[in-house]
Every structure is written in structure tokens, then in C-alpha cells.
Amino acid sequence: MNGALPALATFVPLGASVALGGLGRARRWFVDAVALAAAGATTVLTVALLVQTREHRIIHWFSGWKPHRGVALGVAFSADQLASGAALLVAALSLAAFVFSWRYLETGKNHFHVLMFLFEGGMIGFALSGDFFTLFVFFELMGVAAYALTGMNIGEAGPLEGAINFAIINSVGSFVLLLGIGLLYGRTGALNFAQVARALAKQPATDVVVVAMALVFVGLLVKAAVVPFHFWLADAHAVAPTPACVLFSGIMVMLGLYGVARVYWTVFRGVIGSAQHELGLVLIGAGVVSIVAGSVMCFVQRHLKRLLAFSTIAHGGIVLVGIGLMSHGGLAGSTLYVAGHGTVKASLFVLTGVLLHRFGSLDEGHLRGRGRGLWLTGALFALGGLALAGLPPFGTELGKGLIEEAGSDHAWMPWVFGFASVMTGAAVLRVAGRVFLGLGAAEPDRSERTGRSSPGAEERETTAAFDRTPAVLVVPAVMLLAGALAIGVWPQAAERAQVAAARFEDPKSYAASVLEGRDSLHDTETMAPSSSSVVYGVAAAGAAVALATVTLRRRRPGARMQASLRPALAPVTALRSLHTGHVGDYVMWLTIGLAAFGGLVIVAVH
Amino acid sequence: MIRGLMPYVLALWLFLIGLYGMVTSRNLVHIVMCLAIVQSSTYVLLLEVGYRAGATAPIFKDITSGRSVVDPVVQALVLTDIVIGVTVAALLLALAVQVHKETHSLDPEDLRPMTG
Amino acid sequence: MNPRVRVTLFLVAAVGITAIFVWGFTGLPSFGHYPGPYGDEVVRRTIADRHATNTVTAVVMDIRAVDTAGEELILFAAAVGVIMLLRKQRGERLVAPPTFAEGRHPIPPSTPVRVVSAALIAPAAVLGLYLVAHGGLTPGGGFQGGVVLAVPSVLCFLAARIRSFERLHDPAVWEVARAIAIGAFLGIGFAGLIASTGFLANMLPLGTTGTVYSAGTIPVLNLIAGPAVATAIVLIVVELLEQVTEVRAK
């Protein structure tokens, strides 16, 4: 069977980008209309893919080269429920981004639309890939499009510098990935996931396989902005145009984690065998470090987009912990969490785009009180903050509950997750209170850190009247938050996710589907999310509100209080000082992370 | 045994020396070239794993089929990889040109988007 | 961070990475003994099933054609990105060439350079076309030939006056050409999908081994990929050259 849907879902957006590339002279409304139509069509295709993969995997062999005598020569795209879900999230968020950029976004002819479709197609191709090198090619495609999009606002130095750091670090990550692929090819002589898995099963886990696995993981974890590979994310987010940020935090980062899960379960599971638990602990450890560092850095930010970027790092850590549990409950929870977090985070970025449009600023202090009167934006912003904190019945709470249930052996889990929820939720709520209600002390403008000429001022990305908010800027935020709610409220979400996860984690069934066309999908028993997670969710939301209120007190702490707090805050200051913005430092951290992660993986597997 | 590993160690050396260049660099264009060196380590590794001693190029216009050839697949992969390298370098150099126009500097020390 | 601390930490990490990699290398088959099976199967099937003699091109344009499509799109993304990043900003003035940018020392083109460059344009173009057309038979192919096809533009820059160069290299025209080329590549892809064989399937008659037209879509895709690559590279080069040849003052 050569299912056409995976190929269509990938190449419709890519074809749209080429078509738009030839329409340089067309009017803006025409370009926008074509873009919306293509984005809508892609969304429909990915929905169809999700529906059709409920009972079987859909495999597409490119160029018609089907496997012959068990040897796969051609390139395969393999769609199962989780891959289709990821593709659907890409398509839905892209559609929201295109709605947001309708008419008002300064796009410089059609370049923005072209690059966005290349980005979208690249991400969908990455999610559906069943072959190592194709995975790499689409990884690079989504990377190159993203670097260009980040630097779009060329009028200031910031976007250019952010794009440079982004491009350099992600490129090094992709080369690490390719080195891993090369070692794996050297050992197995194959590039197709299923083929490599079968080849590995015939031999014991030699050193080169473990090293290759570590390299592939590191390459993907750079994209996933896991600590210490995360430095590029905040720099890129701070300066990229809003629709790009929607996609970066909404799904692009999470695709790195999806890649880790896909590669592990489909290819390396058989060879790792009994060492799976220890390997999982390494992933969980990395996740916890990201959670803590991301949450702390998020809370101390004043730049709205940077704040949201660090919260993505923290929540990505939660997803990684879920993956590291190495069970279908954990993976299912992570999947739901990705969907819930992606929609909420995207919505929050859309709302910051509204603030940028109205006031030309993204600085929390600068915006204090300016949002009074924007009641809808403010309410949505606060709601987003509560959703980040894990308020039921948002999808974030459901996902977290499943992960906590799967990880019930780890008593620390609800506390660490709670830390992330409270810190990131409180940061967003604090912003909401300060911007839309005018609460909090008036802070002196601290422009030296941003290095910009005028404190708090950002270059606007939109045209049209700045005293009104066009509907197209707010509607996506509403729809996205509604989506996050829908995921949490849908009664079968947890069950379907677990069945899908269990099938995802079955490499033998995957290989049979891909190489022999035999589908044998089994059902599994599912568990309900831990009932205490609802309580945790409400408690976290409440604590976030409380923390936000405390930090919004009108009077600043006195000099003596500040002096006594300083030693306690020393680690925070140290952590902040590590984020220097210097690309050489970032490369150094990447090398340290590569050595440390590689070493830990080797130790874990032996 | 180390002698047998030397070809692969070459790839590792390119990888590390390129990264070293990036860590110590004071010029953005130099960093882009170091990135190209890091990438060349991937070319070298890929071509090495597909090599067959005593074999010839996998093009059968002038040789009989059945003759021992090296692996054509890695050559195709490296071809794709080279194009990708060109594109990333082009983008980064364009960014460098613009950054220099804005800030009159190519030194990473001066080019920090944001700290903290 | 202090540069010395940075380098020291890097070197420590580098030692660790060396240990990890070398340990991994010991597990590889010894150098010069590629075990297959991918490469060997490809060689076996290409000549029999596709009548192609250049197995590398067969892999690039047929067996793994989707990787090539992705790569073309990456090149497309870079060209669009470069054009977008170097677009004229508010406050920049474009001054007609050949005045050079401030601070640059205009080097008057020397006659030998101009003559040799002009003389090489046609040979370079022919070589590029040859590489593209014969990609399925002998070393070469769409990409290799495409890069060579971009050379005449650079030679034109060296040989002619800048004004003539610019007239021949209007980005708007080249962008449309590029869109058509990549669109054709994807079009063949979709045609394969409609014929329900597979995206980018090789559907054309196979011809005789060893002649220029053989192996179905492989020469066709080569002929499309050549201009696609050439136009993208020319656009990137033109954009970057424009930064030098025209004054832009803010």
C-alpha cells in the first residue's frame, strides 16, 4: 500500500511556498488568500491523516521504491497516530499564524509567506519521516526557514544577532545528528528506521551503536532546547516576528523531543533492552534540569517574549520527563501535554503580538498599566497563565496527570512539576496584572541589559492604526485557548493517547508495517490520570495567583530586605549571568553537554 | 588498532578544531568558516564508512557491472549535505553583512542580542 | 564569560568527546570494508531496473529523490532568505553603480581579467549543460552541473560593466525562473502521486542504457535541477554583490 496522504500533507505546503515564490508581483490580499487556502488545506489533510491512522499505519514509499526481499531501498514516510497528531498541531498552529498575519503584518512582499510554508512543510516532513537521512533533510529545511524568519526585522541589530546565534547552534546540533547517522549507517548499512532496527537486533549492542544513539539524541535535544543546549531559544524568540514565535514555541521545539521518542522506540529499543530504565533516568535527569533552570529564568524576565521562551524550556522539560519514563502512560501524557502546552503558548504569543501592535513595546515595566481597557486581551492572557499553571480542565493538566500517574514511583515528580507550573504561571499572571491592571511598583527603566537605544521600545511588526486591535490579531488567541480546553475536556483523550503511545512503542509491529505491509495493531489496557492531579492543578493555579500577587506589591522591598535576600538569590544571579548572548559561550556549553550526555548514556547502558 | 582508526579520527579532529575555532573566534565570518569545517567532518565520516579498498567509482559507463565499487549511497548523502552547507553559509553571511551595517562590528563580544 | 575560562571548559569537554568518539569508532567495520547491503542492492537494481550507469545520480534523482526535493527547497529557502535579509531598508539610498561603497577602494577591472572572463563564459555554460545532461551516465548531475551553470554569471560580473551585469540579472526575472524550475520538480513529484506509484516515481520510458536519454525521469529531473540550483545560487551571489557595488547609506 502506498498511502498518498503523508506525501500530500508534506508537499502541499511546500508546493504552496514555491507557488507563492513565483507570485512576487501579486497584490497582498491575493497572497494572503492563497496562503490561507493552502494552510487550511494542509490542516484538512492532517486531520484526515489523524483519522485514518486510528486503525493502521499509513506508509508512503517515495518514488515507488518498495522494499524488496526485506531490504528497503527507497525512502518511507510512516504515519501513525502520534506522528499524525504532531503534523496536525503543526498545521493548526500554522493556520493560526497565517490568520494573525493577515493583511497587517509587515512581510516584505511574499517572502514571509514563502518561508512560513517552507517551515511548515519541513516540520510536517520531519514528523512523518521514516528514514534517518530524510529526517535530517527536513530537520535542516525547518531550521533554515526558521533562521531566515527570525532575522526578518532587519531594521535593528537584535533580530540579526538572535538569528545568528540560532543558526549557528542549531547547525552544530544538526551536524552532531548527522555524525550519529553516519556511524549508524557504517554499522548497519541502512537508513530506514525499521531496517536499522532489524539490523541492530541481529547484533549485540556494540559501542558504536550507543555512541551513535547518544549523538542522534544530542542533535535532537539541541532543537528541543534542553539544558545546556537551550541558550539559543530565548535569543531567537525575543526578536522573531510573532507568527514565527507561535510556531517555535508551539511545536518546533517539541518536535525535537518527538524525534528523540521516535528514534528511541522505533530503532534503538530492541538493542537497549534491559538498560532502558537507566537510560530513561538520564533523560529524566535532563528534563528536571531544564524544568528548574527554565522556570527560574522565566520568572526573572521582563521581556515578554523571552519570558515565554524560558517557560517553553521548562515545559519541554516536563515532556522529556514523560518520555523518560519509558512507558505508554508517560508518552501519552507527554503527547497530550505537547498539544495542550502548544496551543496555550501559541495563544500567549499571539497576545504579546497584540501588545506589540498597540504599544510598540514588549517590556513588562514599560507596558505597566498601558493595557487598561484591553479587557479581552487581558482576560485571555490571565487565562493562558492559569492554563500554563495546569488549571483543569485544560489539556496541560490532563497531560501532567497522566505523566504523574505513570511516574507514581517517583515521589518528587508532582513537586518538581508543581514548581514549573507555579513559576511559569505566576510569571504570566504577574505580567497580566502589571500590564492590564496597572498593579505593581513603578520600576526604573533598565535599558542597559537590552542594549537598545530607547528602553522598552521595539520595532513594530504591523501596519495600520495602532489605537485599535484588528480582530484578526485576537481571534487566533481565542481559538487556540479553546483548542487547549477542548483537548482537556474531550473524554476519550487520555485513552486514545495511551493506545496510540503503546503502538508507537512497539518496534516489531512498526517494522512489520513498514517492511512487509503487515499491520498488527494491538490494544492495550489504559490507566486513568491520577485523580490527585486535578487537586494539584487547582493548587498550582492558586499558588501561581498568590505568587503573582506577592510580586506585584506596590512598595518595593526596602534596602535592608534587599541586602538580606541577595545571598539567597545568588544562584539565580549566577544562572542569569551564564546567559551572555555570546555565541562562543553557547558553543562551549553545547560541547560540555555533548560530552556529559554522551558519557551518561554510555554509563547508563553498561 | 589506532592506525586503523586514523581515518575516523580525522573526522573527529575536524569536528573539534572547528568547534574550537568557534569558541575562540572574534569575527563572525571566521565563525561561519569554522562551521563549514565542522560540517566537513560529516562529509569525511560519511564517505569513509562507504569506502571499499581497491574498488572504483560506482559509475558503470566504462566498466563492467560486477566490478567492485564503493558505496554510491553515501556519495549521494554527501552531495545533499554540501548543498545544505552552502545554504546555511549563505544565510549566515547575509546576516553578517547586515549586522555589520547596523553595528559596524563583527565581533561576537559586541553582538549580544540580550543578556540575562 | 572570561575567554580563558571558556576555552578551558571547552578543552575539558573536548577530551571527553574524543574518548567517547574513539571508543565508538572501534565498533565500526574496519576502514575500507564497507559491508553493505544498501549500496550493493542499489548498484544491482539501478542498472537492471533503471538502465542508468551513474548509480550516484540514480540514488539522488530516483531512489532517494525526496531527499533531493527537500534539498532543492532548502536552497530555495536560503535564496529567499538572503533576498529578504538584504532587502533595501528604510533610509537606505541606492546609488547607481559604478560608484563604490564608502570606505571601499574601487579596483578598476584589468583588461586581462575582463578578456579571460568573457572568453570563459561560453565554455563554462557548455560544461555546465554537459554535466547536467549526462548526469545519469557519467560523473555529474543536476547539482554539480547547476553549480557550474552559475559560474557564467560570476564571470559576467568580472568581465562586463556593472550596469550590464545588473541588466542581465534582474532578481525579479530570476526569481520567477527559479520558481518555475522548482515547481517543475515538484510537479513531477505530484504526477507520480496521481499515477499512484509514489511521489517522484520514475514513470517515463527507460530508453537504452548508455545513451543520453535513458533511465526515465532521471535525465528529466537532472535538467530541471540544474537550472533550479543555478538560479538560486545566482540570486544569492547577485544579492551579496549588490551590497558591494551600490552605495547604501542610512
Image: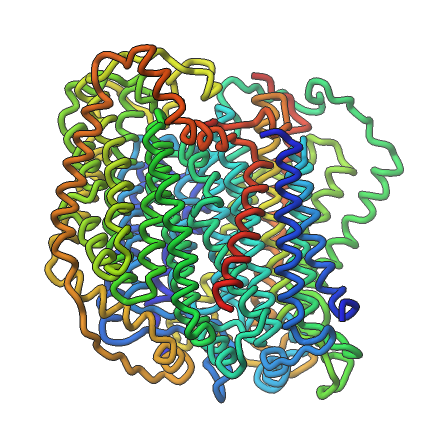
Using the rendered image of the protein, determine whether residue C166 is visible from the camera's viewpoint: no
Left or right for A409, reference B37:
left
Using the rendered image of the protein, determine whether residue A339 is visible from the camera's viewpoint: yes
The N terminus of chain A - image quarter: bottom left
Query: Residue B74, position in %: x, y?
Result: 63, 69
Left or right for A154, reference C246:
left
Query: Which residue, as the protein is rendered here, is positioned at the far right?
Result: C112
Where is residue B41, by image quadrant? Answer: bottom right
Residue for point 20% across, 17% down = A438
Q: By what rule are the colours in the image chosen?
A: rainbow
Against A131, residue A368 (above or below) is above
Residue for point 62% across, 78% down = C39
Query: Residue A21, position in %: x, y?
Result: 45, 46
Against C11, residue A549 (above or below) is above
Q: How many marks?
A: 0
Query: Residue A25, position in %: x, y?
Result: 43, 38
| Near-viewer residue (A266 or C126) | A266
Residue for point 57% across, 74% down = A206
Query: Residue C211, position in %: x, y?
Result: 69, 78
| Near-viewer residue (A529 or B48) | A529
| Near-viewer residue (A170 or C191) | A170
Where is residue C118, by image quadrant? Answer: top right
Left or right for B68, reference A595:
right
Left or right for A429, reference A182:
left
